[in-house]
Image (tube, rainbow, N blue to C red):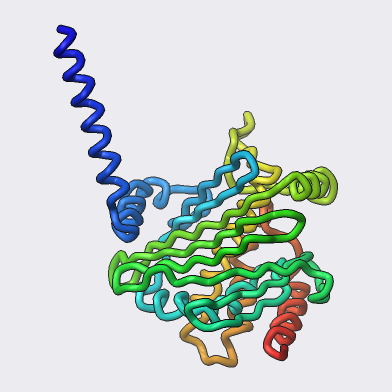
Amino acid sequence: MFEMNRLACFTLILFCCINKASATDLSPAASLRVKFGTLQEQLAQNQFHKPLVLDSVETAGQLEGDIYSVLDYSYAVLEKTLTQTPLWCDVMILHLNVKYCKVSGEKAQSVLSLSVGTKRPQSINAAFRIDYRAQLVADSNDYFQMVLTSEKGPLGTKNYRILLEAIPLNATQTFIHVRYAYAHGVTAKLAMQLYLSTAGRAKVGFTVLKKQPDGKPIYISGLRGSMERNAMRYYLAIEAYLGAVDLAPQDQLEHRLRNWFTLTELYPQQLHEVNLDEYLSMKREEYRRQKNE
């Protein structure tokens, strides 16, 4: 009996190890396709009223948000546009807090220099600078991955990472994964906690912790809620950018700006900050400044 129990345990351990190895041996494209399969129910029914899933994690000193979505654009459109580093500045500038973006360096070693600051008009000198190293990790006819990384951010934050990967589903749809993550120290945590206890005390994210007796959701707040809001703003900037790629060049900016604002206003409790006229006025000026530098 003892020997049989030992054999059974050994077999179970070996089976688990084989399964684990086979999972880790999957290519990034295959892994993303497996993820798509596991998210079918959540993509079909969720609080966003479209095929979108948001997951987030907060560990000691680390925040990470993952957004998975099905977009009604062909893979060829996404691959053609979102693998070109210079175009990312036109994506990033849509975000409320991004005041300026410039690309420098060769294609293999491109750097996106972002100035991030308040949600109101602000000079570049008053904003924080984050230099992202852009790397096209993979680019094929069935999978691409673009990664932006920065070692340093404002107020002691560090290890920023924005990842975008995509696979084709059919001729007109693409499954994408966007990850936004960063690490923070004591200074950043204290600064954010001060903000969240004063001007940002009503701010919430998208994760539902529980529901009140009347059925209304209670959302995550604090640092994790802040990270979720930023992850969603970056994701919606990608959506807004793609929505204008077929327009005449002179019409694209205005369409992207209005589209980004409209998309964020679908979630006013989390993302509303300014009215449309304020946003358009500020972003038009920031875009002119970005193009004239």
* Quadrant that contains the C terminus: bottom right
Residue 243 makes an appearance in the image:
no
* Quadrant that contains the N terminus: top left
Q: Residue at x 39, y 65 (%)?
A: 166
Residue 81 coordinates in the image, percent (x, y): 46, 79
Say left or right for 70 vs 155: left
**In the rendered view, would you say 107 is above or below 130?**
below
Quarter-of-image position of residue 142: bottom left
Q: Residue at x 32, y 73 (%)?
A: 140
Could you say which is closer to the camera, residue 5 or residue 180?
A: 5
Residue 217 coordinates in the image, percent (x, y): 61, 39
Quarter-of-image position of residue 215: top right
Q: Residue at x 60, y 42 (%)?
A: 58
Residue 107 coordinates in the image, percent (x, y): 49, 81
**In the rendered view, would you say 203 is above or below 6?**
below
Image label count = 0
Residue 191 coordinates in the image, percent (x, y): 80, 49
Could you say which is closer to the camera, residue 114 or residue 7?
A: 7
Q: Residue at x 22, y 26 (%)?
A: 12
Residue 241 makes an appearance in the image:
yes
Could you say which is closer to the camera, residue 215 or residue 140?
A: 140
Quarter-of-image position of residue 162: bottom right
